[in-house]
Amino acid sequence: MTWFLLLFVGMGMSAGHVAASMYRMFNGRDWRTVIIYTALFVPGIFFSVSFLLNLVVWAEGSVRAIPFGSMVVVILLWFLVSVPLVCVGGYMGYKKKVPDAPVSIGKTPRPIPPQPFYWSLPVACLVSGILPFSAVFVELFFIYSSIWLGQYYYVFGFLMLTFVILVATCAEVAIVFCYFQLCNEDHHWWWRSFCTGGSLGVYVFFYSIYFFFNQLQTIYITTTVLYFSYTAMISGVLFLITGTVGYHVCFWFNMKIYSSIKVD
């Protein structure tokens, strides 16, 4: 947990840099608002949920509750280290020269023809998450058993290999779906690529429900609330990670295929 917090705080500059540079690439002007969202939105949600859950644990009198002093330290790290780093990285990213489009872009968006029902966003996300989840569900069982059943976890090398396979699988699936989408003359690829890449988080949450009713079988309301709250946050983090992978590989894919077009 200590290394997780330090990594999160230290990567604030990278987060601000990527957010601001991507925002400018799409001709955004209000980059300060983007930096504020980057620094406060997702961390604020997770910190608020964690704080409320900690109040529940305090009310139960459990020794697992996070001390108040540790909560203050986390807040100080967030606002005194992470937020300034995000602002510095955002300023540098917005001033950075964005890559030029490989082809000329018209000012009037091209109309998108009617798409079949099986190519809708919910169906695409449902299908695209099958392969990434199949690459990690075995490892996910051991991780959940370690967290919630108190079992030892020691195959960290295999976990690293599984993570590499997961990133590669998400990238390949996102590129395939982006290619089919462009073949159907749908040029709105950015959010779809993010959702198709991040669909793993939905499958992980569904697996969390299955694991709860088949492994834990608890009757305590507090345990149920803690379990589903923390698994929802885990699923949300995985959605953001794999969704980011899907978006960036699709961006690279589009730049490559359109740069190869020869216009006489």
Image: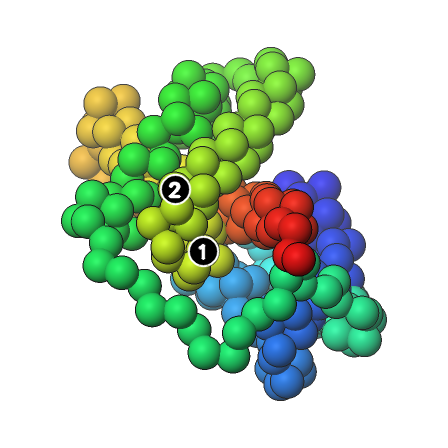
Q: Which residue occupies the extreme front position in the image?
A: 264
Few, some or many residues within 10 Å of mark 1 (<14, 14–19, 20+): some
User: Residue 17 versus residue 24: which sits nearer the camera?
Assistant: 24
Callout 2: SS: helix
Residue 263, by quadrant, is bottom right
User: Residue 9 versus residue 15: which sits nearer the camera?
Assistant: 15
Counting from the top left corner in percent of width and height, residue 89 is at 78, 67
Counting from the top left corner in percent of width and height, residue 79 is at 70, 71
Q: Residue at x 45, y 23 (%)?
A: 136
Q: Residue at x 42, y 50 (%)?
A: 182
User: Residue 73 versus residue 114: which sits nearer the camera?
Assistant: 114
Tell how many labels: 2
The reply to whether residue 231 is in sight is no
Q: Amino acid at mark 1?
A: Trp
**Residue at the spot of label 1:** 189
- Closer to the chain start, of discs 2 and 1, is 2
Q: Which label number is shown at residue 180?
A: 2
In the rendered view, tell whether residue 171 sits above or below residue 73: above
In the rendered view, tell whether residue 189 sits above or below residue 24: above
> What is the spatial separation of the Cα atoms under label 2 and label 1, in whole angstroms?
10 Å
The reply to whether residue 94 is in sight is yes
Few, some or many residues within 10 Å of mark 2 (<14, 14–19, 20+): few
Callout 1: SS: loop
Q: Amino acid at mark 2?
A: Phe
User: Residue 6 versus residue 114: which sits nearer the camera?
Assistant: 114
